[in-house]
Amino acid sequence: MVETDEATAPLTKGRRGRKRPRIRPYHKHGLTTLRRTVEALGGRLLDGRTTLAKQLAAWRADLVRDLGGDVTTQQLAIIDLATKTKLMLDSIDAWMLAQRSLINARKRALIPVVRERQALADALARYLGQLGLERRGKPVPDLAAYLAGKTLPAAAERAR
């Protein structure tokens, strides 16, 4: 059970009208907890053994490969942000698909997590837009340099 400081905890009424500290704030969806965990633990959250970690690592490697393999430090920072955003977006999508309805019938409106999911999707699109949408190949040497590189090792082996 979580203990709270009585001076800072919000108060709720008990059965007999007494005010008592609330144990924990109520969050209907897990986005706040997930976001706080990712920010606190960063890359240590996913250690590479889970299926989710392997899929995220493969997505990140594909992204680096699509950028030509040799990326700058700034690009790596954006790639890390995009990977974390993708993790949160996939988690929200999985949670939303498990719900019976995305509409709050009392308020006649979408549940708030739909708006937050759209904000994350927009952020991911911005990160990917900053990295560029076109695929970049690795730099390839010209034909003369390639042939020179192939003939020198072969000539060195024949000289032995």
Image (cartoon, helix red, strand yellow):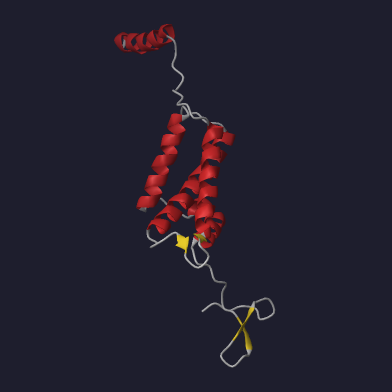
Closer-to-camera residue (31/159) = 31
What quarter of the picture does the C terminus occupy? top left
Residue visible at 56% across and 74% down? 24
Q: Nearer the viewer, residue 31 or 41?
A: 31
Residue 119's x, y, as percent?
55, 48
Q: Is residue 106 above or below residue 72?
A: below
Question: Where does the image place residue 46, in percent across and percent down from the top left?
Answer: 44, 53
Residue 149 picture location, percent across and down: 40, 12
102 sits left or right of 40 in the view: left
Would you say residue 46 is visible in this rendering? Answer: no
Residue 36 locus on image (x, y percent): 55, 59
Camera sees residue 30: yes
Q: Residue at x 53, y 65 (%)?
A: 107
Say whether residue 8 is left or right of residue 59.
right
Number of callouts in the render? 0
Report the residue that reaches farthest toward the right.
7
In the current view of this chain or complex, which residue is farthest to the bottom?
A: 16
Q: Is residue 122 left or right of residue 59?
A: right
Q: Residue at x 37, y 60 (%)?
A: 98
Q: Is residue 25 above or below residue 103?
A: below
Residue at (66, 81) in percent of width and height: 6
Instruction: State the residue in front, 126 or 54.
Output: 126
> Can you tell which quarter of the image residue 11 is in?
bottom right
Q: Nearer the viewer, residue 27 or 159?
A: 27
